[in-house]
Structures are given as structure tokens and as C-alpha cells.
Amino acid sequence: FDLDVHTVVGMGAYPFPELSPAGLEALVEQALALADAAEFAGRQYATLSGGEQQRVQFARVVVQLLAAKPAGEYRVLFLDEPIASLDPRHQVALLRAVSRLTREHGTAAFVVLHDVNLAAAWCDRLLLLADGHQVALDTPARVLTEEQMERVYQLPARVLDHPERPGLPWVLFRSAAGIDRSY
């Protein structure tokens, strides 16, 4: 489809026709800034890389979330793999933006992540699933144990203290880290 980024982000407000043009513009600008995607506003969506498109879609979701939130009302943000296709800088920036939304806008966030270390660093509680069934639901330190990592991922795992944040678990999958190269 031949739409510019600004239009795609503004689509987040389609369920809210009562939103004024000035209100929509303010939300789009706020969301693009939060998603670190303001530089793309005038570009055609189809010309963006996968990671850039991911950031634009996050901005669209932010517009919908903020447009739907009357004062004092609680909202929940569901994000499935929001950092897929993003480089490490933008992974952290997007997770920081989600954290900011939870703090500043009274939003709860359920985020699906496959990187257990990023999940531990950014989430208060983790739900660990295996074959669609709950294995554990608790704090990162209680969920990310060697036994549970090996059971779920079927790889030898070591769980260490994070080198910069003591008390935070840091998972090393041994074959993934090159420690065990036997196949």
C-alpha cells in the first residue's frame, strides 16, 4: 500500500473519529517521537526496512492507546515480539518506551519476548511457557532458573548474576555461547 508513515501512524486513531485533527496531529508526533521514528514521518511506509516498519507500527499502537485513554481509565498494552527486526539500540529504546508508557500513562503491558535476558531486565514479572502451558509465573529471579531454562529450551543453561545489575539473573545457553560445539 502506498501510504506515508504519518498516515500509517494516524490510523491508530481510526476507532476514535471524535478526535480533532489537532489532537490527532499531537498524538502522531508524540508517538513517532516515543518510537524513535519521527525521521520517517514523510517517507513511504513500503520503503522502510523491517525494523523501521516495526517502530512505525509501535507508534501506531501508541496513538491508539493514548487516543483511547480517558483520564483515570486503565489500559492494557499487548505486544507480541515488538523488538523483532530491531537492532540492539532500538530494542532497548522500544522497551524503554513501553516502560515509560506504563509509568506515565497508567498502562499495564504484556510483552512477548524470546530473549530471556531482555525480559529479565525490563519486566517485573515473567510468564514462562512451554508448549502453550504455564511453567512459571513470578519475578525474573524465580522464573529464570537453570532447571526451568533447560526444561523449556532443551539447551544446557547457566544462570549467573548480571554483571552490571547484581541480583538480576543473566542466562547463558551453553551451546548458544559456543561452549559446547558438539552437534
Image (cartoon, rainbow, N blue to C red):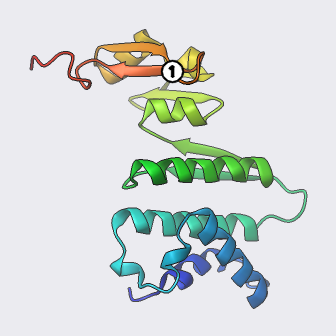
Which residue is disc 1 drawn over?
162
Q: Residue furthest front?
A: 164
Label 1 CA crowd tier, 10 Å (few <14, some 14–19, many 20+):
some
Would you say 133 lies left or right of 46 here? right
Q: Looking at the image, is 3 positioned above or below residue 107?
A: below
- Residue 81 seen in this snapshot: no
Q: Residue furthest top?
A: 147
Residue drawn at (63%, 22%) of the image: 139
Would you say 81 lies left or right of 143 here? left
Question: Which image quarter holds the N terminus?
Answer: bottom left
Residue drawn at (38%, 29%) of the image: 131
The percent position of residue 66, horizontal first and vertical second, equals 74, 66
- Number of dots carrying numbers: 1
Disc 1 is placed on an element classified as: loop
The percent position of residue 80, horizontal first and vertical second, equals 49, 50
- Residue 88 seen in this snapshot: yes
- The residue type indicated by label 1 comes to His
Residue drawn at (28%, 19%) of the image: 155
Q: Looking at the image, is 97 positioned above or below residue 11?
A: above
The percent position of residue 152, horizontal first and vertical second, equals 37, 21
The percent position of residue 38, horizontal first and vertical second, equals 56, 74
Residue drawn at (44%, 84%) of the image: 43
Residue toward you, 151 or 172: 172
Question: Which image quarter holds the C terminus?
Answer: top left
To which quarter of the image does residue 174 belong? Answer: top left
